[in-house]
Image (spheres, rainbow, N blue to C red):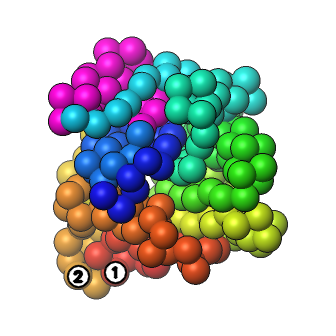
Amino acid sequence: MRLKDKVAVITGSSRGMGRLIALSMAQEGAKIVVNGTTKEPVKEVVEEITKLGGYAVECIESVTTMKGGMRIVNTAIENYGKIDILINNAAITRDRTLLKMTEKEWDSVIDIDLKGVFTCTKAAINYMVEQKYGKIINVVSAAGKLGNVGQANYSAAKAGVIAFTKTCSRELGKHNITVNAVGPSHKTRMYDGVPEEVFKKMTASRSLRRMSEPREIPPIFIFLASEEASFITGQIIGVDGGLSF
């Protein structure tokens, strides 16, 4: 129960890695705001958590606007009275080589993967600064450090999140708010459209020669959200089989 009575907002937590983080944090005692843009999967995660004896509420909202970010964070305030933890997990990919990439494919990724981190963080720190406490954990990618063919939009967004994380940690440390990022690497539904042979080339350089298993990822988020990591901020931590971080 390392997160007992803490309130965690997790964007993009209706599926995939976000769902696993939400379930794991609930099992550690946190009260969860499950966020996504499609009602049914969000509702299912809330029900999973409550059936396990945890606490969770839903928020069907996009992270792409300032109003959306505020509504997501305010869901925690309205239901639990505070926000202790923010996990900026919401992300998409729209893979295409730069020669063929459209403005819409660029903008949609930047809006969710980069601007969405800003909108929710901006909303959350209003409360975190006042209570003099907060844990913000962003999700980044090796693509943001190394680049990746066909992912100019995604790579640019994640590189922006890395820089945003480091800057926020410098600005917010005096308010007892830590800001870190996790760079996981495992095959999610974001890669469903990537041919298997291309996917193998993308991951061929990793030192451990395997991707992390989904179950191996939530523990680092729990650690960074706990009091055990009160001295850690401005760090980018890889859970990626030695790929880059």
Residue 38 covered by magenta stretch: yes
> Where does residue 237 sit, x and y in percent of width and height?
47, 74
Helix, strand or loop under label 1: loop
Q: Is residue 136 left or right of residue 176?
A: left
Nearer the observer, 89 or 156: 89
Please tell me how crowded label 2 is: few (under 14), some (14-19), or many (20+) other residues with Cα within 10 Å: few
- Return the mark for residue 208: 2
Q: Position of residue 87 (x, y in %)?
A: 51, 49
Q: 156 or 178: nearer the eye? A: 178
Amino acid carrying mark 2 in the image: Leu
Residue farthest to the top, as pictured: 39
Can residue 143 be spotted in the picture?
no
Does the magenta run of residues contain 77? no
* Residue 69 sits in quarter: top right
Residue at 41% of width from left, 40% of height from top? 31
Q: Which badge, 1 or 2, comes first in the chain's sequence?
A: 2
Question: Which class describes the residues within 10 Å of circle 1: few (<14), some (14-19), or many (20+)?
Answer: some
Tell me where the magenta segment starts and ends, as one range: 32-52
119 in relation to 43, above or below: below
Reply above or below: 107 against 38.
Answer: below
Task: Tell me which residue sits at (24%, 64%) in the image.
Answer: 216
User: Is 59 positioned to the left or the right of 116 in the image?
Assistant: left
Q: Position of residue 222 (x, y in %)?
A: 38, 61
Q: Are marks 1 and 2 in contact (CB under 8 Å)?
A: yes
108 up-or-down from 61: above or below: below
Q: Which mark is residue 49?
A: none
| Overall secondary structure of the magenta section | helix
Give the residue number, with chain letter if any, for mark 1.
242
